[in-house]
Amino acid sequence: MSGVAYRRGELHVDEVALPGLARSLPTPFYVYSASAMRDRLRGLRAAFAELPVRLFFAVKANSNLAVLRTLHAAGAGMEVVSGGEIRRALAAGVPGAAIVYAGVAKTADEIRLALEVGVAQLNVESVPELERISRVATELGCAAPIALRINPDVAAATHDKIATGRKGDKFGIPFTEAGEVYALAARLGGLRPVGLHMHIGSQITDLASFEAAYRRGADLFRALRGQGFALRRLDLGGGFGVRYADERAVTPADLARLVRRCTEGLDAEIWLEPGRYLVAEAGMLVTSVIYVKDSDERRFVIVDAGMHNLLRPALYNAYHAILPLREMPDTVATPADVVGPVCESSDVLARNRPLPPLQEGDLLAIATAGAYGAVMASDYNSFPSASEVLVDGARWAVVKPRRDAEAQFADEVIPDWLRVATPRSG
Ligand SMILES: *Cc1c(COP(=O)(O)O)cnc(C)c1O
């Protein structure tokens, strides 16, 4: 059995029953299904079997080394946005040749690292960046394989904070300037323009947004080829939406049909960079009820997970389903706000959510938390961090231990001048 489901009344990830797991581990903890991740990757790969497609996992969605290793072992390359993510990918056993490097603020050190480890491609977001890559590559005596990230000026139907392909977003080079910048890339030393890149945003479920962008991308790709640029790769980015509530999630078959239609006769390798799509539904955040507080006609279910573990509800008003670890049939659901322990009014995981009767110590799973969850965590308020657990069939392992306050402040330093006198209390 793979993925997340109730069996015999208990929520399972693959063959591991979560109530049992919660007896071995303190909450909160993330739990990921390796098989669910592989299934998603396999589904995409099967749908695109007839097209020359390469898949790169967007590391920022879930950068745990065990997750990277799982997806790489199943055939995915990695898309990274920083030198730190390059080092993570390498540490997970991914070779440079399977890494594509994007990001708006690449420093000379990061570019040097990317070139030294031989990344497959650098996706370039601006002219000054192009010039810097040219300089670093020339110093190293190599030719950097580059693609320009083009901003297609498409307003993807998604949350404002995760749309990236509109005029005025900080990402990419304006569509209308692409020709000029490729010409510049051809003139500068140390550069080998091999592709065209775009990525219009995240959690997009409306295929029309992708279609508009992909058509613009494919047209531009043809035009640039016509002007003599030897481009071989059209990198269409990621952003494929998943099902948090009742969205109509993007299906691999729909996506493959669309890509085929938009790239008909292009004679190019198609690259895709799914992040969320591969991992979101494979992960959950398990939490315990600390208190149930009834006040002013509102019920607050106060839990030990919050915005310090999972920022998406506070940052994007994101919806996550909340499931009791033990199924509670024959109970009446009443609306409650599920809130975390952090001293911020925005630390709300769910508002007005119909939930079965709950009491202190009950266990809940916050669903669809495998993407943009643990990676966005912070030590704010010095609560213990959520550990991360990888399940594969009947096996499970802690792939990142919980960090308590002592671990969080272990590297903080009280300078000498503050050590001299012990302050009097009071
Ligand atoms: C974030 C990002 C992705 C992945 O986005 P998802 O919505 O998680 O699929 C892909 N490419 C680039 C350049 C990104 O910044």
Image: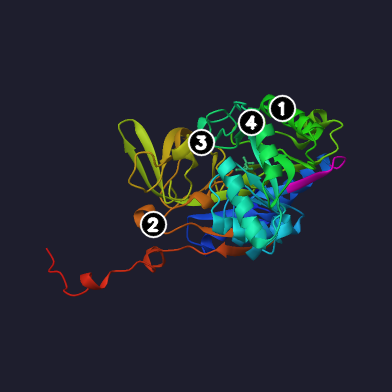
Residue 350 percent location from the top left of the image? 46, 37
Badge 1 marks a residue whose secondary structure is helix
74 falls in the magenta region = no
Asked whether mark 1 lies closer than 8 Å to ligand 1, one says no
Residue drawn at the location 72% of the way across and 53% of the way down: 120
Left or right of residue 388, residue 412 in this image: left
Q: Amino acid at mark 4?
A: Glu
Circle 3 Cα neighbour tier, 10 Å, few/some/many (<14 / 14–19 / ≥20): some
Residue 360 percent location from the top left of the image? 40, 50
Q: Amino acid at mark 3?
A: Ala
Asked whether 34 or 201 is in front, the reply is 201
Residue for badge 1: 216
Is residue 165 visible in the rendered image? The answer is yes
Give the CA distance from mark 2 to mark 3: 22 Å
Upstream in sequence: badge 4 or badge 2: 4
Badge 4 marks a residue whose secondary structure is helix
Asked whether 195 or 51 is in front, the reply is 195
Quarter where residue 292 is shown:
top left
Which label belongs to residue 270?
none
Residue drawn at the location 71% of the way across and 43% of the way down: 186
Residue for badge 2: 383
Circle 1 Cα neighbour tier, 10 Å, few/some/many (<14 / 14–19 / ≥20): some
Q: Amino acid at mark 2?
A: Phe
Asked whether 361 or 92 is in front, the reply is 92
**How is colour applied across the structure in the image?**
rainbow
Q: How many marks?
A: 4
Upstream in sequence: badge 2 or badge 3: 3
Q: Are marks 4 and 2 in contact (CB under 8 Å)?
A: no
Circle 4 Cα neighbour tier, 10 Å, few/some/many (<14 / 14–19 / ≥20): few
